Amino acid sequence: MKITAVKTFTVFAFRTNFFFVRIETDEGISGVGEATLEHKENSLAGALKDLENHLLGRDPRRIELIWHDLVRDGYWRGGPVLMSAVACVDQALWDIKGKALGVPVYELLGGRFRDRIPAYANGWFAGARTPEDFAGKARKTVEMGFRALKFDPFGSAYMDISHKELTYSLAKLQAVRDAVGPDVDLMVEGHGRFNVPTAVTIGQELEGLENIRWFEEPIPPDEPSALLEVKRRVRVPIAAGERLYTRRSFFHLLETGAADYLQPDVSHAGGISELRKIAAMAEARYVSFSPHNPSGPVACVATLQLAAVLPNFPTLELMAVDVAYRRDLTTEDLTLEDGCLLIPDRPGLGIELKDESFGEHPYKQVFLRHYRGTLTDIRPPDSVPYFEVKKS
């Protein structure tokens, strides 16, 4: 079997542009991957073009060798663009191998450890502004079956936060807690906003709220020792890692002991192959592994393959709603049952692109909203769930 073509697709999806790849072979088997990298889609397309000649003519089943060669022969290592390019290729190669053997990718990774994975909701707060808005949307999301919710209540704050802004942010959190009760986990998203003293102040305030699962990315992602200082001074668990891209970065984070939950993204941190290795390092230190998963349909099913096999994978991020046409883009078929996503059992990743529909949603430039006070404009008003909801 030989690789004959590497095709890329960029599809507008409101918050970002989905970036997909399809790798084709001379035996008619193709594999798909995703490297949705917000605000860097054109750079990513160039990186895939650079990799194409390294892939054409290769046997796609030799995944470890190809991964090694792409990283080694790229010379410049790491970074979001290069590692995202490798990540989507890696996903597609696992997809090809699973299809060739007629089994889901998880069978190639050791078989299922579990049949379903608890999911926590992100994006459920689209359009919310006031504490009352957040409370109402939280109730509706829990009614879908979710038992955990994540959101960033911090408006446009960056590095520092005023007393007024902090009080209002905490009011949103308290309103959600009052709305959903004490048994629903809350994850507080920081988006790398704060300096150490501000993150410590916020973290200590979070200690007074019931059942905060974690404080995510409280400071920028660059310095594990600074994150450790936050962790030392607050009692709320710390989650981090969505903007780290290699096993070596996670090795340093683990050695520092600065995070309780590791959050690499299958779209950015080298794909399924690299995440499996990062998870093993975390498991050796009894650290939980909860990948970042806010992107598109291919990244989600790739992450589910890892959720199936990793013992230290406690919960999966899932966007509660998405653009109304998401189901038109792929054959994605997800089921949320009693707050858990079922693990698909189709061969490979179990998904195909419907690229004939992509022309209806061409690339549009999207700018970061995190620090401009418009973060809750994460989805359009007509957003809908894109998965089947079942309750036993």
Image: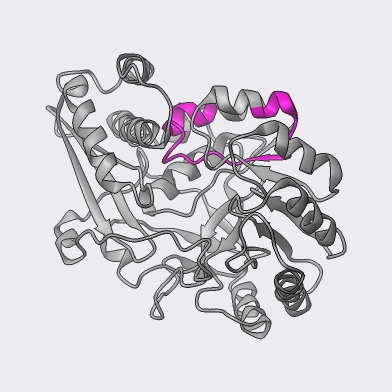
Please name the colour scheme applied to the rendered image. Answer: one colour
**In the figure, is residue 273 to the left or right of 351?**
right
Image spot of residue 261 (x, y percent): 68, 41
Is residue 259 rendered magenta in the image?
Answer: yes
User: For the point 52% across and 58% down, which residue is it?
Assistant: 318
User: For the point 22% across and 58% down, which residue is it?
Assistant: 363
User: For the point 38% across and 80% down, which residue is it?
Assistant: 382
Q: How many marks?
A: 0
Q: Magenta part of the protein: which range?
A: 253-276
Is residue 206 rendered magenta in the image?
Answer: no
Image spot of residue 242 (x, y percent): 54, 43
Q: Is residue 287 above or below residue 145?
A: above
Q: Quadrant of residue 63?
A: top left
Q: Is residue 1 visible?
A: no
Q: Is residue 177 above or below residue 84?
A: below
Nearer to the camera, 131 or 222: 222
**In the figure, is residue 236 to the left or right of 301?**
right
**In the figure, is residue 25 to the left or right of 317?**
left
Q: Quadrant of residue 322?
A: bottom left
User: For the point 37% across and 44% down, which residue is it?
Assistant: 346
Nearer to the camera, 23 or 102: 23
Image spot of residue 350 (x, y percent): 35, 45
Image spot of residue 3 (x, y percent): 17, 25
- Assign the C terminus to one quadrant of the image: bottom right
Q: Is residue 160 above or below residue 325?
A: above
Q: Quadrant of residue 180?
A: bottom right
- Assign the N terminus to one quadrant of the image: top left
Q: Is residue 83 visible?
A: yes
**In the figure, is residue 34 to the left or right of 336?**
left
